[in-house]
Image (cartoon, rainbow, N blue to C red):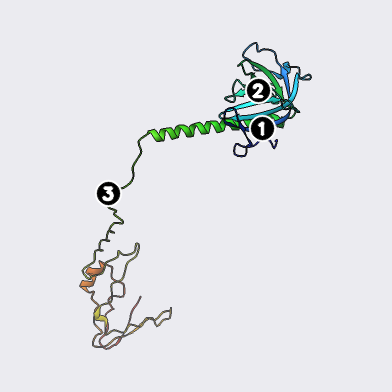
Amino acid sequence: MSHYHNSHINNSWTKMAAEGEYESILCVKPDVNVYRIPPRASNRAYRAADWKLDAPDWSGRMRITAKGKAAYVKLEDKISGELFAQAPVKEYPGIAVETVSDSSRYFVLRIQDDNGRSAFIGVGFGDRGDAFDFNVALQDHFKWVKQETELSKNAQLGDSGPKLDLGFKEGQTITLNIGQGKKRDKPRSQGSGGFGLLPPPPGGKIAPPPSSGLSNHNIVPQMGSTATGCLLELDSSNSNTVVQSNTSSDLLWGEFSAPASSAPPPSQPQNATNWIQF
């Protein structure tokens, strides 16, 4: 891509003394060929194959400039810089610059003289990169024109429309509610003893708590499969005591089945030891 193709910000500007406007150079191509083309017979696209490509009618330099919103494709002499022809371009793509259907290196320009007379000629580039630069230079310019037009319309609509005043009037105040009170958790329900009761685990039973009536019994469990079993040494005065479950405890814990060892077997008065089977 040629180094002559620059953006609008870095364009070189020349003062136009006659009209007092600035003209920017968009692109310069040192070699371009010009062809006379036959008139278009129908609405079909132009074809470069219909031209005499091996015998161009003129060769020189192309310079693309922009003044205001319009672009100008100027064909100039390579040495003297004398203007051969120019094509004013007010939109692209458009009638002023058209592509051909069979090649990307050839275009059709509508040139105009100072009296407003116009004619169509063919132009071609020897290198595809030069043709690409020519195409992009025009596209970038009219993209910029479109953005400037939209910004101008938005500025006019903003000035004509009512303005929104968000400032505070004199003496005007506002109230802000920052945060809200947290809801307190409801107290958990408790039983008569002041502690919450948990349900028994599934598939199992809980043995009742020990009764105060067993305070004088010393039960010594003996593990193993020996023949001696479990020996209970009971006080002779309390040997006939039968363990009774506490009524208040049963109400608290619910109904449970009594374990097999809750009632000791009857003992003989003369023997102080008994066997208990588990």
Picture quarter with the C terminus: bottom left
- Residue 254 drawn above or below residue 216: above
Mark number displayed over residue 27: 1
Q: Earlier in the sequence, mark 2 or mark 1?
A: 1
Tag 2 secondary structure: strand
Residue 146 picture location, percent across and down: 53, 31
Horizontal relation, residue 36 to residue 169: left or right? right
**Residue that sits furthest to the top in the current view:** 41
**Which residue is located at x 69 percent, y 31 percent?**
28
The residue beneath circle 3 is: 170
Q: How many marks?
A: 3
Which three-letter amino acid code belongs to the residue tagged 2? Gln
Q: Nearer the viewer, mark 2 or mark 1?
A: 2
**Which residue is located at x 21 percent, y 72 percent?**
248
**Residue that sits furthest to the front in the current view:** 17
Q: Earlier in the sequence, mark 3 or mark 2?
A: 2
The reply to whether callout 2 and callout 1 are in contact (CB within 8 Å) is: no
Residue 59 picture location, percent across and down: 75, 23
Mark number displayed over residue 86: 2
Q: Residue 165 falls in which quadrant of the image?
A: top left
Horizontal relation, residue 246 to residue 46: left or right? left
Which three-letter amino acid code belongs to the residue tagged 1? Cys
Tag 3 secondary structure: loop
Q: CA distance from mark 2 to mark 1?
A: 14 Å
